[in-house]
Image (spheres, grey):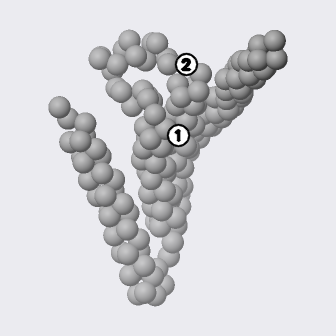
Amino acid sequence: MKERITQAVEQGFEKFLWNSRFIVILAVVASMISSVILFVVATFDVFELIGKVFKYMTLSGSERTVAAYEEFHGDVVGHIIGAIDDYLLATVLFIFALGLYELFISKIDEAEAEAATSSRILLIHSLDDLKDRLAKVILMILIVTFFKNVIHTTFSEPLNILYLGVGILFVALSLFFTHKGSEAKERGNAP
């Protein structure tokens, strides 16, 4: 009798532990909502930029000075890089939401069914898959952020230009090693 009670309590507790994984739904939903918000905000910024382009194009010849063009160009490039940054972050949140769902809740049947004809980037089979996909997108966000900051930097001293060169070298090395890591992983999975 005591053994049956102990077994029932153990089974009940294990069922509770297993079903507690559904708390991850909160993170999935919040990440998806955050992703949608960032996609909308970035798209709104692009449409706002289109309005600024049309406004600049309608300036009269006397208003199109070199200073006005420099300001316009910096504004356009900054907006575009900012939109790319927002889209990449939205993508991170989207992949994170799908990955959490697949790892903790259930496989996404639709993704598995379309895996032969579409990209496999959204198929997450392990925590390492999720980590690798997120790391690559986060690296791209860091690269975009680096270049966004470089665009607005003035180089008043020669040493600053050297720092820029070193920064670009580090970006190139990170892309090189990421690519080499992906190639090695693919070779390891090849039949």
Circle 2 is placed at which residue position? 106
Point out residue 74 in the picture as x, y percentages from the top left corner: 50, 59
Q: Amino acid at mark 2?
A: Ser
Query: Does 116 appear above or below 120?
Result: above
Numbered circles on residues, count = 2
Q: Quadrant of the N terminus?
A: top right
Point out residue 39 in the picture as x, y percentages from the top left corner: 57, 34
Query: Does 109 appear above or below 50?
Result: above
Query: Does 189 appear above or below 174?
Result: above
Q: Quadrant of the C terminus?
A: top left
Which is nearer the eye, 140 or 151? 140
Estimate the spatial distance between the alpha carbons at disc 2 and disc 1, rounded to whole Å. 20 Å
Point out residue 33 in the picture as x, y percentages from the top left corner: 66, 29
Which is nearer the eye, 101 or 33? 101
Q: Amino acid at mark 1?
A: Val
Query: Does 99 appear above or below 1?
Result: below
Mark 2 surroundings: few (<14), some (14-19) or many (≥20) residues within 10 A: few
Disc 2 on helix, strand or loop? Answer: loop
First in residue order: circle 2 vs circle 1: 1
Q: Is residue 56 visible?
A: no
Residue at (52, 64) in percent of width and height = 149
As drawn, the residue found furthest toward the left would be: 191
Which is closer to the viewer, label 2 or label 1? 2
Circle 1 is placed at which residue position? 92
